[in-house]
Structures are given as C-alpha cells and as structure tokens.
Amino acid sequence: MRHLLLMASHSGRTNMHARNLAIVWAPNLLRSRDIEATGFNGTAAFMEVRVQSIVVEFILTHVEQLFGDAPLRGTARGQGGGHT
C-alpha cells in the first residue's frame, strides 16, 4: 500500500492520484470470489468493483493511521517477504 501511496505522490505528473490508483488496483487487491463464482456482469459487477475501489481509496488516504510507521516487510528494518 505504501508503494501505491508513493505513486499517488507523483499524481501531478501522472494524474494517478489515490482514486485512480484505487480504481485500477482494487479488483486485484480485493478480488471477489462472488463475482468470479457467479459470473456477475453488467451493473452487479460494476457495483462490486465500485465498493472495492472505495475501500482501497480509503486505505490509501489513511495509510499512516492504519499502518503507522510499521517497517515494511522485506526491508532492513523488517524481515521476511511480502508487501504492506
């Protein structure tokens, strides 16, 4: 999430602010088995993705409150693999 926040900090040049990043990344970060299992399409799928993007945008705009200054895993301060 912090990487996406870093990307949002360059929105002046890229136009990829938190909302646009959330729209792009939400379906991958919050994959819905309901959509995949039932084959939602049209309005139902759009509404599901809309909810996902709102959640991801909220997380992106509140990274510090949610994660504090916890070290990123896989960095010198935090050991292990994966991403925050």
Image (cartoon, rainbow, N blue to C red):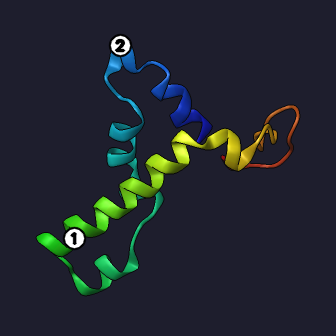
Count of number-bearing discs: 2
- Name the side, left or right, on which 39 lies relative to 29: left
Q: Whole-Å distance between the Cαs marked 1 and 2?
A: 31 Å
Q: Quadrant of the N terminus?
A: top right
Which residue is at the far bottom?
A: 38
Question: Which class describes the residues within 10 Å of circle 1: few (<14), some (14-19), or many (20+)?
Answer: some
Question: Which class describes the residues within 10 Å of circle 2: few (<14), some (14-19), or many (20+)?
Answer: few
Q: Which residue shows up at 33% across the image and 38% down it?
A: 20
Which residue is at the far top?
A: 13
- Name the side, left or right, on which 77 lies relative to 38: right
Residue 58 position within the rendered picture, expressed as x and y whole percent measured from the top left: 49, 49
Is disc 2 placed on a helix, strand or loop?
helix
Residue 70, numbered circle:
none
Instruction: Identify the amino acid type marked 2.
Output: Arg
Instruction: Identify the amino acid type marked 1.
Output: Ala
Is disc 1 placed on a helix, strand or loop?
helix
Q: Which residue shows up at 42% across the image and 36% down it?
A: 18
Residue 68, quarter of picture: top right
Which residue is at the far left?
A: 42
- 1 or 2: tag closer to the N-terminus: 2
Residue 55 position within the rendered picture, expressed as x and y whole percent measured from the top left: 45, 57
Residue 24, quarter of picture: top left
- State whether residue 11 is above or below residue 28: above
Give the labeled residue for mark 2.
13
Q: Which residue shows up at 32% across the image and 47% down it?
A: 23
Q: Is there a contact, CB below 8 Å, between mark 1 and mark 2? A: no
Residue 43 position within the rendered picture, expressed as x and y whole percent measured from the top left: 13, 71
- State whether residue 79 is above or below residue 30: above
Q: Which residue shows up at 36% across the image and 40% down it?
A: 19
Residue 45, numbered circle:
1
